[in-house]
Amino acid sequence: MKGEHLTQFLIHEQRKSPAATGEFTLLLSDVATACKAIAHAVNRGALAGHLGVAGSENVQGEVQKKLDVISNDLFIRSLEWTGHLAGMASEENDQVIPIPSGYPRGKYLICFDPLDGSSNIDVNISVGTIFSILRAPDGVTQPSEQDFLQPGTQQVAAGFCVYGPSTVMVLTTGSGVNGFTLDRDVGEFILTHPNLRIPADTAEFAINMSNRRYWEEPVRRYVDECVQGKDGVREKNFNMRWVASMVAEVYRILTRGGIFLYPFDTRDPSKGGRLRLMYEANPMSFIVEQAGGLASTGRERIMEIQPHSIHQRVPVILGSKNEVERVVSYHG
Ligand code: F6P
Ligand code: MN
């Protein structure tokens, strides 16, 4: 119900499944607490000396921003003690993150990108946190990387929080998608966007056009046809947006439709794409599909990919159903 706060919403959902123990509700509530702490750190920005680079690189060879490191620590510290998790995997950590000895283990695994869109931090453009929750295989209390490598169809929940003009958390547990706005005065996420739905048609696309010369033919054809607008085969004009923050891009698509592409490109063919499957592509695909959209690599449904490593990259094409289907058909 619009206006209820996140914990209320989760408990109402929990009561619908009599077998639920409440562990999952508590886990999601702890994830929300982590996001509130990160929202605060992002919001303080330069006042707290949080901007700029940390002077290190992550496992992906990306320069880490101070806020990447701060957000990663806040997320880990907020969740490691709770007893709901068997292990964690982060964009910023090479290996899976064990639960420190001394804390109880739970039955869930979480994969997360603590601060998506890092290139936007210092220029005061929206960034966000993305997470994907899986079940730990039966009896596993010290998960290895292998235990995380489950296809996206196995996700129990997924969500993201976008730190923009307002802080908004988007969540799916597999029965639709809901959006909650952080009310800073009371410190709660309030359900403001119940049952988000992505329209099947759109006239808005998002892609990093500077990579055009590296794309494969089907993507080049699709984007060129959008750009030709009324004068081309599509016979209608398209608009383009590129925030370079996937969280902002997906939130826009959930709000008014659109298509987002980060396709395979030939800059480094060994990488297989730009975005990471386990903590970017899978959670966003789950959310988009639950809102009536589609998510594909162009050749297969993202959520059906059998992962081979936690930092694996994949091509991502997601959003309004009819447009994603068109791009997929161009790959056929
Ligand atoms: O974490 C990956 C990411 O920051 C996404 O949020 C965004 O879509 C993409 O990288 C931006 O990449 P580029 O540098 O090509 O604009
Ligand atoms: Mn990211």
Image: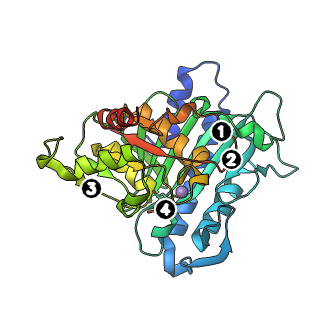
Q: Secondary structure at mark 1?
A: loop
Residue at position x 30%, y 33% from top? 322
Which residue is denoted by mark 4 in the rendering? 117
Q: Given contact means CB atoms under 8 Å apart, are the residues at marks 1 and 2 in contact?
A: yes
Which residue is denoted by mark 1 in the rendering? 307
Q: Secondary structure at mark 3?
A: strand
Which residue is denoted by mark 2 in the rendering? 310
Q: Decide: few, some or many residues near mark 3? Use Cα within 10 Å; few <14, some 14-19, many ≥20.
A: some
Q: Decide: few, some or many residues near mark 2? Use Cα within 10 Å; few <14, some 14-19, many ≥20.
A: many
Mark in front: 4 vs 3 = 3
Q: Does any portion of residue 110 appear in the rendered image?
A: yes
**In the figure, is residue 16 to the left or right of 93?**
left
Q: Secondary structure at mark 4?
A: loop
Query: What type is the residue that disc 1 sits on?
Result: Pro
Residue at position x 63%, y 68% from top? 70
Q: Mark 3 to mark 1: distance in Å?
A: 31 Å
Q: Nearer the viewer, residue 281 or 6?
A: 281
